[in-house]
């Protein structure tokens, strides 16, 4: 939009990794096939996260101190995350896309400066969704290849900078994306060359069993789309309305406990913070929509690493997500026991993943193929991110982030979840709505806690 503060590009460079250490050379592949967990996300829009950092002193030079440290540490961490320096390709003779790293590849890094107000953007107030777009890089994609990741570092005139990271969802999920960021931050802060052991990626694809032939089913779903070049790696991006605004809401530990105690009066089952928070969001959504017939659909993704048999290492590099979907009667959500009803259904949805993590997975490829062809057809509310990722622990040496946003979560049907910088807050929720709807949602969100 015309009134937005401009971003001036200072430099665009390609950051290449140094050669792998001899002891790790065999463990860090330059070529990696996609599994069915990855293929599911092949044409899903890229994931964009934005980290805001306040500088402790005006004496710290952005170009002479911050940028060189970030560049050096980025190159070093790419040695351990080699596939992120490569590209996604789908060759004519290949059944599946692969990640390939060849000489000359690297991560696109943009250095920029902005005239926007750092403190206004990193606050919890209302922001037009377009305000964040100049701060995150576009992922270089074409018919023939797609970059796996792109990074932008932006300096603000009043004491802060941001790091925007865009990644291809078919390459890594939020678990590994945030592990990469935290590994990069740790190397930058400690001036070491090796991330801590639990952040070192595990690349062995043989741990992902595929007895149902899901990879072939998902690849066929993409190849059978009604489009001229079904091997194209171009991405169709959702288009948010210019009138959309985003804001952040907080679940304090105190409010989460009050909600749990209220539910326990009606249900003896232990309830997690995730369940009670998402149940509360379902109730707020139903109230915002008003009295309607039918059900509210709520979809969520769950980490599959511990749910597969045998389990997959937590540091496995790649996607490892399964999805759950629950349906809740709207009239019931508006009643006195609405939160208890939502909790009951969400608990059932989570438990349904325990017995058969891949139950019905044969149909997932067709569902995603239809969704990415027209994002406007999505009707269920869903989630992005997770408080378990610990994004606020990504300290590059200048302190923890002031704020973290999932910029790509720009639909009124998507809530983004994260931990918080504030020790009193158990969970942050990112919300996108039309401004008037956001004002109503904010009132509903706060009124519910006042009534506890």
Image (cartoon, grey):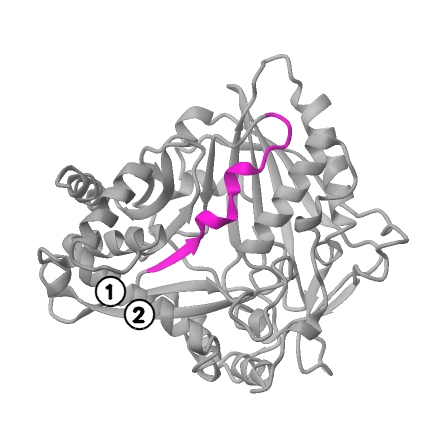
435 left or right, relative to 28: left
Whether label 1 touches label 2, CB < 8 Å: yes
Name the one closer to the observer, 419 or 225: 419
Q: Position of residue 167 (x, y in %)?
A: 58, 54
Q: Residue at x 9, y 61 (%)?
A: 291
Residue 142 lies in the magenta stretch? no
Please report the bounds of the magenta region as a residue range. 382-398
Using the image, determine if residue 271 lies above or below residue 67: below
Question: In which quadrant will I find the C terminus?
Answer: top left
Identity of the residue furthest to the right in this view: 22
Question: In which quadrant will I find the N terminus?
Answer: top left
**Within 10 angstroms of label 2, few (less than 14), some, or many (20 or more) residues?**
some
Q: Which mark is residue 83?
A: none
Q: Is residue 70 visible?
A: no
Residue 385 lies in the magenta stretch? yes
Name the one closer to the observer, 181 or 132: 181
Q: Which mark is residue 344?
A: 1
Q: Circle 2 is placed at which residue position?
A: 348
**Within 10 angstroms of label 1, few (less than 14), some, or many (20 or more) residues?**
some
């Amino acid at each position: 939009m015309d009134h937005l503060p401009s971003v001036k590009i200072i430099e665009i460079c390609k950051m290449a990794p140094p050669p792998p250490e001899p002891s790790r050379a065999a463990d860090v592949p330059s070529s990696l096939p996609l599994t069915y967990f990855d293929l599911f996300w092949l044409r899903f829009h890229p994931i964009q996260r934005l980290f805001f950092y306040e500088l402790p002193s005006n004496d710290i030079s952005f170009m002479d101190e911050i940028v060189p440290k970030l560049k050096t540490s980025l190159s070093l961490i790419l040695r351990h995350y080699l596939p992120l320096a490569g590209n996604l390709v789908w060759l004519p003779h290949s059944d599946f896309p692969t990640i390939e790293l060849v000489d000359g590849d690297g991560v696109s890094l943009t250095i920029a400066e902005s005239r926007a107000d750092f403190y206004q953007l990193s606050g919890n107030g209302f922001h037009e969704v377009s305000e964040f777009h100049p701060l995150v890089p576009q992922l270089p994609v074409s018919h023939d290849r797609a970059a796996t990741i792109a990074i932008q570092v932006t300096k603000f005139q009043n004491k802060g900078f941001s790091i925007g990271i865009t990644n291809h969802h078919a390459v890594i999920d939020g678990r590994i994306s945030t592990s990469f960021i935290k590994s990069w931050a740790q190397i930058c802060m400690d001036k070491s060359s090796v991330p801590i052991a639990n952040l070192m990626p595990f690349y062995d694809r043989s741990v992902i069993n595929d007895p149902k032939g899901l990879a072939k089913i998902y690849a066929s779903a993409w190849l059978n789309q009604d489009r001229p070049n079904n091997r194209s790696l171009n991405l169709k991006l959702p288009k948010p309305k210019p009138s959309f605004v985003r804001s952040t809401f907080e679940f304090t530990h105190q409010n989460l406990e009050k909600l749990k105690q209220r539910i326990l009066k009606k249900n003896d089952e232990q309830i997690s913070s995730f369940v009670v928070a998402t149940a509360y969001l379902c109730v707020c959504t139903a109230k915002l929509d008003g009295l309607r017939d039918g059900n509210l659909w709520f979809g969520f993704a769950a980490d599959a690493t511990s749910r597969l048999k045998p389990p997959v290492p937590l540091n496995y590099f790649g996607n490892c997500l399964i999805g759950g979907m629950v349906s809740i009667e709207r009239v019931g959500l508006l009643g006195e026991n609405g939160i208890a009803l939502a909790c009951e259904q969400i608990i059932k949805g989570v438990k349904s993943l325990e017995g058969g993590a891949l139950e019905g997975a044969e149909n997932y490829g067709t569902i995603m193929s239809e969704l990415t062809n027209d994002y406007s057809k999505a009707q269920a509310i869903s989630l992005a991110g997770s408080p378990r990722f610990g994004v606020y622990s990504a300290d590059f040496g200048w302190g923890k982030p002031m704020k973290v946003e999932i910029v790509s979560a720009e639909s009124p049907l998507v809530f983004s979840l994260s931990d918080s910088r504030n020790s009193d807050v158990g969970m942050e929720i990112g919300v996108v709505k039309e401004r008037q709807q956001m004002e109503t949602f904010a009132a509903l969100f706060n009124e519910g806690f006042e009534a506890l």
